[in-house]
Image: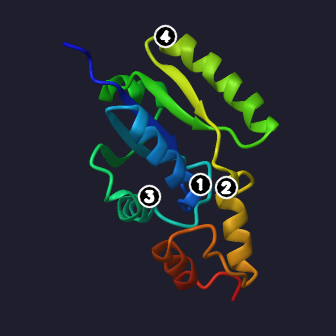
Amino acid sequence: MLKERKALYPGSFDPPTLGHLDLIERAAKIFDQVVVAVARNDAKVSLFSIEERVEMLIEGTGHLENVSITSFEGLTVDFARDIGAMALIRGLRVLSDFEFELSMAINNQKLNPEVDTVCLMPSEPYLFLSSRQVKEIAALGGKVGHYVTPQVEARLRAKKLGK
């Protein structure tokens, strides 16, 4: 019997973008199970709570039967080991992402050689999309409907950014 191919897609997802959802959908086609996990990082100031980010991800991925959403704290590779993941999913948009992700992949491999890093390139519409940019656009009163789901857009408006 083959071992289930489970992947972990960790991130801050503050907020989740259509680029994140694109990677989740594509990873769900490659792996038997994908666990999307919101990382708890007290050093970062987040717009949305962990619970809000989990809710938004659940709303955006509800149609994917092999995707589950959770949160975690601590080392990503330790959480990957705890859930039985064989791979970490990471997105690569630009060259600086590659340099950062390569460094992380090497460190993660030293910490847990059982977990590989799998990098996915974004689909073209999401090549330069980031949560930080979405928050900045929303804060300046710009429309973000091309970057996030309607549910996330409503939550951004509810935060009354920039007002």
Q: Which residue is mark 1?
A: 19
For residue 50, which numbered disc appears in the image?
3
Q: Is the C-beta separation of discs 1 and 2 under 8 Å?
A: yes
Mark closest to the chain's N terminus, 4 or 1: 1
Mark closest to the chain's N terminus, 2 or 3: 3
Quadrant in which residue 143 is drawn = bottom right
Reply above or below: 36 against 132: above
Crowd class of label 2 (few under 14; some 14 to 19; many from 20; radius 10 Å) = some
Mark closest to the chain's N terminus, 1 or 3: 1
Q: Which residue is mark 2?
A: 126
**SS at circle 4:** loop
* x, y percent for residue 19: 59, 54
Distance between mark 3 and mark 4 Cα atoms: 29 Å
Mark closest to the chain's N terminus, 4 or 2: 4
**SS at circle 1:** helix
* x, y percent for residue 113: 49, 10
Decide which of 31, 83 is in the foreground and name it: 31
Q: Is the C-beta separation of discs 4 and 1 under 8 Å?
A: no
| Residue 1 in the figure: left or right of residue 89 | left
